[in-house]
Amino acid sequence: MTSTVNIAILGSGLFALHAYLPNLLTPENKHINLHTVWSRSESSAQKLVDAAKEKSGGSVSPRLTFGDDGLETVLNDKEIQGVMLVLPIRTQMDLVFKCLKAGKHVLSEKPIGTDVAAARELVDEYEKTYKPKGLIWRVAEDVDHEPMVHKAAEKVRDPALGPVLYWSMEAHGYIEDASMYHATEWRTIPDYQGGFLLDGGVHDAALIRLVLPNPPEQIISSANLHRNHIPPHDIVQAIALSPSTETEAHGPASKLKGIRGRDEIPGGIGRSSSTGTIVFSFAIADLDSKPPKGIIVNCLNGTVRLQMVAGNWKLEVQPGKGTNVKPFTEEGKRVGVREECAYFARAIAALKDGQQVDEKESRGNPRHMLWDVALIEALLTSNGEKVDMQKLLSGK
Ligand SMILES: *[C@@H]1O[C@H](CO)[C@@H](O)[C@H](O)[C@H]1NC(C)=O
């Protein structure tokens, strides 16, 4: 039996209401007790409290707190073990350490920071000061917690597929002007790079990071703004390189006898390194059906696709003819938000009960989330020049 964990949710905006609340109240998350709700304004906190009561048929009735005093109440309350931060990026960056300092375990919404430099500082400080004290900090990017993404990663690593030759990742979104998620102050006029590309793109960066055995080491990209209502940029298109994977081309040379030797070919002969293309876009028209979001990984002996089809994940392995690769197809629901709440609370419960945190459920590591922000920053800033991911990450 997992013991119950008291959680406070900080922030009561759309995502708290539509994504967190239903997932906190599912039967799978019975080990979570929604103890307190906090928001900057009373009316906004009230909305979330009311929704919690209504959705749970009255069985869940969190305490309402708001404003600076309310925040102090949450931080000083020994009953609250974990906090979930569902707030605009900048507010969140300030609050993470306030909560950790108060001895609370933290799950905070993505992105981890507005840029690599700011996010790196947070991660360094967490690892130096708070992690050694046994305090958990996880970032909720949900893709990191999607079972189907981890299954795709496993499939790509099937030795029968051989090495990854090339891949493509595409995500096309349409943001209607003044629509629900657009009409938030912090998104309409963002005070951080990329706008929706950062906010939404970190999910897709996580997908690349998790699925590929060799994530990009260098990025060459172009960023644009096609639609005036979603500044600063609404599309990045890029080539992603992994020079460390470079090998000779695969398989035997052709059985056919040519008229000239290989060393006589003008321009020389190519080598093989795992290379990909990335398109993250909010610039597409409002189509009836958008191209599916996802990644296609072309390996020596087959192709793996993980795509979002009609709101669900679809994973497919297509074998090359005459290879030993097994065909595979599976569909799966999106359960990332539910899982990240569940795993977070179970990790707290384990610590509370003097047990180890389940390694398989240790996701949302801030260090990995930093990579996701770095990928977006590289995509936004490359301007046709090569950006080295390691250099960007280390700041040197
Ligand atoms: C790929 O398939 C070929 C048969 O078409 C086989 O000879 C080769 O060993 C396979 N590669 C791997 C890595 O299994």
Image (cartoon, rainbow, N blue to C red):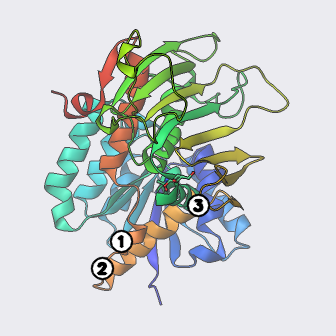
Residue 31 at x, y percent in the picture: 52, 79
| Circle 3 SS class | loop
Task: Pick whichever, 272 or 352, lies toward us.
Answer: 272
Q: State the image quarter where residue 59 is shown.
A: bottom right
Residue 261 at x, y percent in the picture: 40, 20
| Circle 2 SS class | loop
Q: Which mark is nearer the camera, 3 or 1?
A: 3
Which of the image's four quarters has the C terminus? top left
Amino acid identity at mark 3: Asn
- Residue labelled with disc 3: 324
Residue 356: give its label: 2
The answer to whether the beta carbon of the residue marked 3 is less than 8 Å from any atom of ligand 1 is yes
- Residue labelled with disc 1: 359
Characterize the local packing of mark 1: few (<14), some (14-19) or many (20 or more) Cα atoms within 10 angstroms: few
Separation of disc 3 and disc 1 at Cα? 32 Å
Amino acid identity at mark 2: Gln
**Pointer 1 and pointer 2: residues touching (CB < 8 Å)?**
yes
Quick one: label 2 or label 3, which is nearer the N terminus?
3
Residue 267 seen in the current view: yes
Q: Which residue is drawn at 38% across and 60% down?
A: 74
